[in-house]
Amino acid sequence: MIESKIQSELNKKYNPEGSPLRNQQLHVLDILVLFDKICRENGIDYWLHGGTLLGAVRHGGFIPWDDDVDVCIKAVDYRKFRKVFLRNLPKRYRLVDYRTSPKECHRTWIRIVDTKYSVKRIYDEEIVTEPVWIDVFTMINGTVKKKRFLENTHGKILRRRMNVILDGHAKRNVALLLYPFSAFLTDIVKLYDRIFNKDLYVQNYGCFFFFKELPAKKLFPTKDIMFEGHRLRGPADSHEICRLIYDDYMSLPDEEERATHDILEFISN
């Protein structure tokens, strides 16, 4: 973890107490703590992922300029996870995926949304108002080489089917026609990988922006990790996972590379 003096200076600069970004972080944290509680009570294994894991390792919580929360579960636990969360989430929270909200959800992963709050931010040079959420990704056995191939076949078909890729009715209709065949092929590949590539994990097909092979022995068994004063779940070797994803993970990026999400206002609905 970085020195406390440096951490204090970063907090003062990017997310001081009472700032819109800090309010956003704390309410996203509330979702994460609830997520952890439901997972533990129902025997669902999960772990902090991506920038959230990096934040835990390097900062003991959020990266000061970031408000995202990413967590992972095994794809084989997806059905149980979905059933448990649809049954146990308090009323103000929603599980949002393509099946629950096909017109609203144009992504292949799950979000747990807190409907009580919204955030106003600048996105693509426009002011937008969005709900507050955490992202839940699934991981499967496999290799990056195979994932890249299937992302260019089944992944594109899947994303057209879900209106993630909007490139015309003709291509979407072809995707709808081909989907059962590409899904069957992908299921065969997944079965093969569970048998012959069980020592490696990659992010599930349809998630087109993360291409890293992570060793199973560095992910599992998951163990507790501290995040913003809360005991959550992380990989077996969080430092090695961060190294594999980010390389020189303990070094702070240059200031111009510290991408904030331009939060203007945190709103209670």
Image (cartoon, rainbow, N blue to C red):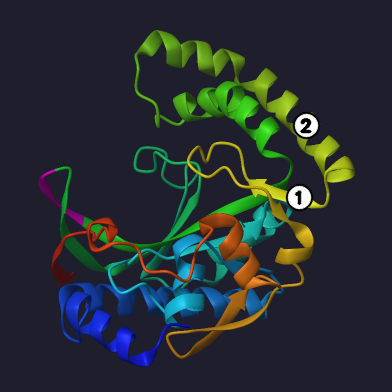
The verdict on residue 132 being magenta is: no
Query: Circle 2 — which element?
Result: helix
Q: Residue 37: give its label.
A: none
Query: Circle 1 — which element?
Result: strand
Q: Amino acid at mark 1?
A: Leu
Residue 134 position (above or below residue 138)? below
Q: 26 or 209, which is in the foreground?
A: 209
Tell me if mark 2 has few (under 14), some (14-19) or many (20+) residues whose alpha carbon lies within 10 angstroms of its own. Answer: some
Instruction: Give the residue number, with chain letter if any, for mark 2.
Output: 189
Q: 254 or 137, which is in the foreground?
A: 254
Rendered residue at 75%/33% (across/down): 187
Q: Is residue 167 left or right of residue 137?
A: left
Q: Is residue 135 left or right of residue 86?
A: left
Which image quarter: residue 266?
Answer: bottom left
Give coordinates of residue 141: x percent, y percent: 75, 46
Instruction: Give the residue number, with chain letter if any, for mark 1.
Output: 200
**Of labels 1 and 2, the one closer to you:** 1
Query: In the rendered view of the protein, which quadrant contains the C terminus?
Result: bottom left
| Residue range (magenta) | 125-129
Q: 52 or 73, which is in the foreground?
A: 52
Q: Is residue 250 left or right of residue 190?
A: left
Which image quarter: residue 196?
Answer: top right
Give coordinates of residue 204: x percent, y percent: 62, 43
Rendered residue at 56%/81% (across/down): 232
Rendered residue at 60%/37% (across/down): 205
Residue 226 position (above or below residue 45)? below
Tell me if mark 1 has few (under 14), some (14-19) or many (20+) residues whose alpha carbon lies within 10 angstroms of its own. Answer: many
State the residue lying farthest toward the right.
Answer: 195
The verdict on residue 128 being magenta is: yes
